[in-house]
Amino acid sequence: RTSEGVESDIYCREIRFNRATLRPVELLTRPEPRYAENRLSDGVRGSAIYARGGWTGFRNEDLVARVDLGRVTTISKAGISTLVDYGSHIMDAASVEIAVSEDGIAFRTVACQTYPEKPFTLEKMLLEHILNFPPISARYVRIRAIRAGRLPDELPTARGLQPFLFVDEIYID
């Protein structure tokens, strides 16, 4: 209650800080225009209800993003968080690759992981794909997340459509 007697609800959001938080993220591929928010380093996880915002969505391209850490620093893990919502044609990443650079030009891959397709379900899932690697010095980190190839047969109305990849956060530590 304010001094004027006005009541207000308290609104809280958890912010997860890491070395990518609030750092510049350059998208090297183009997201779907209606899901083009680039809040990949704000530290706030998106909701399982993608329409609430906070998600960057890719349909015809994979995610390729470059994060500038501001200075050369030692890191040993990096990754992304994703949404799976089959009913909205949103699937998980098929693979994630992490590459590092000190100059932003010459990148070296330090980790890559492929992921099996999740079994079809109407349950929404918030997932994290964090890849660990030996400590290495880097100023720039490039994250490549490959979209799933096709929507499952259990979605007959989606035949011929490309699945979305929705990403809300990039993590680097």
Image (tube, helix red, strand yellow):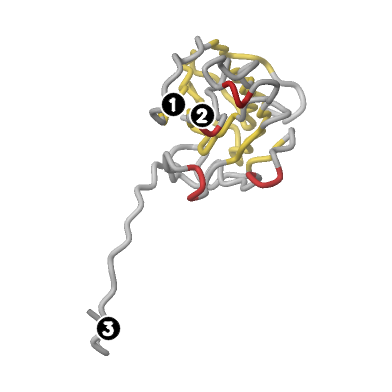
Q: What is the number of the mark on residue 6?
A: 3
User: Considering the numbered disc 1 on the image, is that residue within a helix, a strand or a loop?
Assistant: strand
Q: Is residue 1 left or right of residue 131?
A: left
- Tell me where residue 122 sits by quadrant: top left
Q: Position of residue 77 (x, y in %)?
A: 48, 22
Q: Position of residue 84 (x, y in %)?
A: 48, 28
CB atoms of marks 1 and 2 within 8 Å: yes
Q: Position of residue 140 (x, y in %)?
A: 64, 31
Q: Is residue 123 left or right of residue 94?
A: left
* Three-letter amino acid code of the residue under disc 3: Val
In this figure, which residue is indicated by the disc labeled 1?
A: 128
Distance CA(mark 2)–CA(mark 3): 40 Å
CB atoms of marks 1 and 3 within 8 Å: no
User: Considering the numbered disc 2 on the image, is that residue within a helix, a strand or a loop?
Assistant: strand
Quadrant of image for the N terminus: bottom left
N-terminal of the pair, mark 2 or mark 3, is 3
Residue at the location (71% across, 45% down)? 33
Q: What is the number of the mark on residue 18?
A: none
Residue at the location (55% across, 10% down)? 114
* Three-letter amino acid code of the residue under disc 1: Glu
| Front of the two marks 1 and 3 | 3
Distance CA(mark 1)–CA(mark 2): 6 Å
Q: Is residue 31 visible?
A: yes
* Three-letter amino acid code of the residue under disc 2: Ile
Q: Is residue 172 visible?
A: no
Q: Is residue 51 left or right of residue 35?
A: left
Residue at the location (57% across, 44% down)? 23
| Front of the two marks 2 and 3 | 3
In this figure, which residue is indicated by the disc labeled 2?
A: 80
CA neighbours of label 1 inside 10 A, class few (<14), some (14 to 19), many (20+): some
